[in-house]
Amino acid sequence: MSWPSNSPRGLSAEQIAELNRKFESSDAALGIEVSDDFTQFDQLNDMFTRAFWDDTVKSKHTDGFFDSYRMEFAPRRGAGFNQKDFALRNAAWAVSDIISNRGNATGEREGFQSPIANDTPVAPMQVDVEDPQRETAEIKRLAKMFGADLVGITEIDERWHYANRADTRDFTPASNELPEDITHVIVMGHSMDPDLVDTYPSALAGASTGLEYSHEAAIVVQLASYIRNLGYEATASMNDTALVIPYAIKAGLGEYGRNQMVLTPEYGPRVRFSKIFTNLPLVADTPKPLGIRQYCDICTKCASACPPKALPFDEPTDKAENQSTLGHVKKWSADCEKCFGYWAKLKTDCAICMRVCPFNNRGTLKDRIWRRLATSQFRRYALWWSEKQGLPTRLKPNDWWANIGDKPD
């Protein structure tokens, strides 16, 4: 596909270089290395978006993958992939789907290819924020009251914003704009159900993803509505507008892992993230090194367990694997085409790399002791301990269903 010549193209090279200088010290503290050759990622190259317009990605498998979310296919009879499993997964997505489908007529898939539309106008009178530190504490408490598990604040950093968003009517580039005076990003983490995650790969496990997208859709709408009622801009966002992983890291919620996920101290990779762009006077968090990434330097459990071999065993690099990879940032990068191809064959998400990650803990004493070792100078002992235990045992989907049926009301 060729893009229209007048399509928006994002930040210029000069603007990128200026932002690199602005965030040089904080990037260094977080282990983020961005070259001056960096360009913003185009959302049209996102793997899921490519599946709609790129003939090299489209196939009978991708059609079946998307059809499965509408039950327009014949489910397999195997455990974890029968009609009940797909039915539960799709039901878990229902609230998120209601939000994301509202803008179909205008090509805005809210929360995914465009931000969530404002249901509440910005109040004409503005609350005077005399103490941004106190306001920040209040916002964090309110976010948790609405249901977020983790909350962090960071400054706006447009390097991570998409150069274009996708118009879902014809999958052409559209402007990816926010109100001009946005200053901060509220990043929220939403922990996934550990028992469902333990059944990956299965359609049943996909309910753990859908549940948190539905939960976060409600949470970001509610918190953004509150902020707009205070008289400030607040744009609710899930997977749209900007890459959430760098924002979650900059907000101090975790560190980047070999499995391409943010590894949090509280839940490991078992977290979905949402965000709110706002001009409410807030104080950004100052992230501290957690020692998680250093463990990933010596651990390849996720890469070894990946069925399509889409995860890297090598050192981080700033080279792009393909057009669905963000280049010119030194990091581990997956082969997204291999990964999505496997998802398409399953007709659901995989996330084995999430399930087997040793940071994927439940807060037990053993988990706490292991994490303490893994993030210290004794990380190689933690690696030996993890390898001695082997891969975590997958919870059989039939056992999950039996447990649900046996639980008292």
Image (spheres, helix red, strand yellow):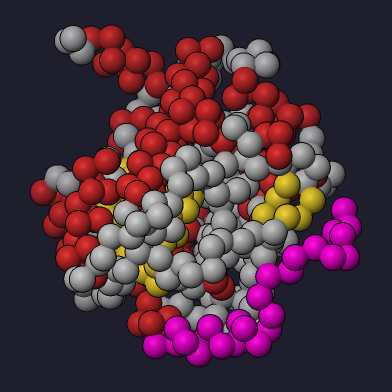
Q: Is residue 12 left or right of residue 315?
A: right
Along the line of sight, the residue nearer the viewer: 386 or 172: 172
Instruction: State which quadrant residue 41 falls in.
Output: bottom right
Residue sitting at 67 percent across and 65 percent down?
163
Give above or below for 186 relative to 341.
below
Residue sitting at 54 percent across and 76 percent down?
330
Along the line of sight, the residue nearer the viewer: 406 or 153: 153
Q: Is residue 1 left or right of residue 191?
A: right
Can residue 288 be seen at all in this image of the molecule? yes
The magenta-colored residue range is: 1-25
How many dots with numbers?
A: 0
Q: Position of residue 70 (x, y in %)?
A: 62, 20
Along the line of sight, the residue nearer the viewer: 284 or 356: 284
Q: Is residue 134 left or right of residue 293?
A: left
Residue sitting at 39 percent across and 37 percent down?
218
Q: Is residue 80 covered in magenta?
A: no
